[in-house]
Image (spheres, grey):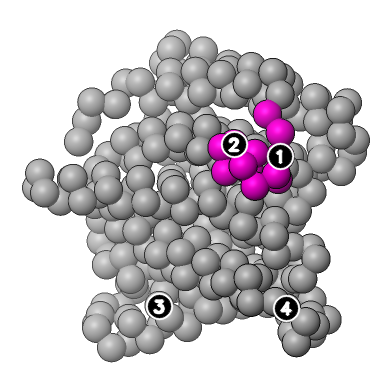
């Protein structure tokens, strides 16, 4: 079990690093070459095909009828809404802002757990929720003042995406104990594909494929292979070996790593306001996750 736990931590760090690079790499592709919804269509269709083939060849497992609705809701919140909101929001805001909004996920997951599964919220967690929410709201206000409505809308969409993913984390937890990770991600992406194609397919017809340079094709390959296929599979699979709160700790690494990458590539700039708001959000996430941080 110790080796499995160590492997899970290595994979969690890998997925965190991929997510941090994805903020800036995706900005290279959109909107200049492919629209946000066009990228989503490519991501979801590619992943659905890969997971369907792997599952058909290696995994012989069926979904029980009583889990159909929960599988659909996981696909809706974890794939369709999550992807549509994130890429549209990232297109309108900066990598650093987006990463700061995404670290709100543990706070949102706690709130959703309290609503759906009636999980008890302690005073410390309430304090964490207040601090984290304050940081997120101040970042939204700062975006509206400094950069206009476009960045504000982008930040808000990424925050809604984080909310959608928080719901997904709560819904998927009981399924992870009953099914193979490949079974789950196969169905999540097949259902998600049906939902997102009407949004993304028209945009793909407008892409000038012959004008896309080699570097952008590499960026698209990174988004499909690493950000989508590997990250989704690893994120679902590692939950068998570590507590979800432990996995949530790795989200602390996203803002500093994303900032370093974005600033180095000239995609964003770090301001004192962003540092202050990130501290509020990070402290909030820490307090929300504090109770179970020692559990493996």
Q: Where residue 25 appears, x then y in whole percent?
A: 62, 57
Q: Looking at the picture, tell me which residue is in the foreground, 39 or 275.
A: 275
Mark 1: give few (<14), some (14-19) or many (20+) Cα within 10 Å: some
65 is higher (above) or lower (below) than 264: below
In this rendering, the answer to whether 53 lies above or below 266 is below
Q: Quadrant of the C terminus?
A: top left
Give the mark, 2 or 3, whose residue is nearer the N terminus: 3
Q: Residue at 45% across / 35% down in the picture?
A: 253
Q: What secondary structure is found at the residue carrying circle 1?
A: loop
Please report whichever mark, 2 or 1, sits nearer to the chain's N-terminal start.
2
Residue contact between numbered discs 3 and 4, judged by CB atoms under 8 Å: no
- Pointers 2 and 1 in contact (C-beta within 8 Å): yes
Specify the segment rendered in magenta. 259-270
Q: Residues within 10 Å of mark 4 (few under 14, many from 20)?
A: some
Left or right: 267, with 79 as reference point: right
What whole-number distance in Å separates the C-alpha atoms at marks 1 and 3?
35 Å
Q: Residue at x 40, y 65 (%)?
A: 230
What is the CA distance from the residue labelled 3 to the residue labelled 4? 27 Å
> Mark 3 — residue?
51
Q: Is disc 3 placed on a helix, strand or loop?
A: helix
């Amino acid at each position: 079990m110790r080796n499995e736990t160590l492997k899970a931590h290595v994979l969690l760090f890998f997925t965190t690093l991929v997510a941090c690079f994805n903020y800036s790499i995706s900005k290279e592709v959109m909107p200049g070459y492919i629209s946000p919804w066009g990228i989503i269509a490519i991501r979801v269709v590619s992943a659905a095909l890969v997971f369907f083939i792997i599952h058909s060849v290696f995994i012989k497992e069926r979904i029980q009828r009583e889990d159909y609705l929960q599988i659909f809701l996981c696909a809706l919140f974890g794939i369709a809404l999550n992807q549509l909101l994130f890429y549209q929001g990232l297109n309108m805001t900066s990598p650093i802002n987006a990463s700061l909004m995404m670290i709100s996920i543990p706070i949102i997951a706690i709130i959703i757990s309290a609503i759906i599964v009636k999980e008890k919220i302690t005073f410390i967690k309430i304090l964490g929720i207040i601090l984290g929410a304050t940081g997120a709201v101040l970042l939204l206000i700062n975006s509206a003042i400094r950069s206009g409505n476009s960045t504000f809308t982008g930040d808000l969409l990424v925050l809604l995406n984080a909310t959608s993913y928080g719901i997904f984390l709560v819904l998927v937890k009981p399924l992870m104990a009953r099914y193979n990770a490949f079974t789950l991600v196969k169905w999540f992406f097949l259902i998600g594909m049906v939902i997102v194609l009407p949004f993304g397919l028209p945009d793909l017809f407008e892409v000038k494929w012959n004008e896309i340079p080699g570097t952008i094709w590499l960026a698209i390959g990174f988004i499909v292979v690493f950000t989508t296929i590997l990250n989704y599979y690893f994120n679902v699979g590692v939950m068998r070996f570590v507590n979800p709160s432990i996995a949530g700790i790795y989200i602390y690494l996203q803002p500093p790593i994303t900032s370093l990458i974005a600033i180095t590539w000239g995609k964003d700039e770090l301001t004192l306001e962003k540092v202050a708001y990130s501290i509020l959000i990070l402290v909030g996430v820490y307090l929300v996750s504090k109770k179970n941080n020692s559990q493996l």
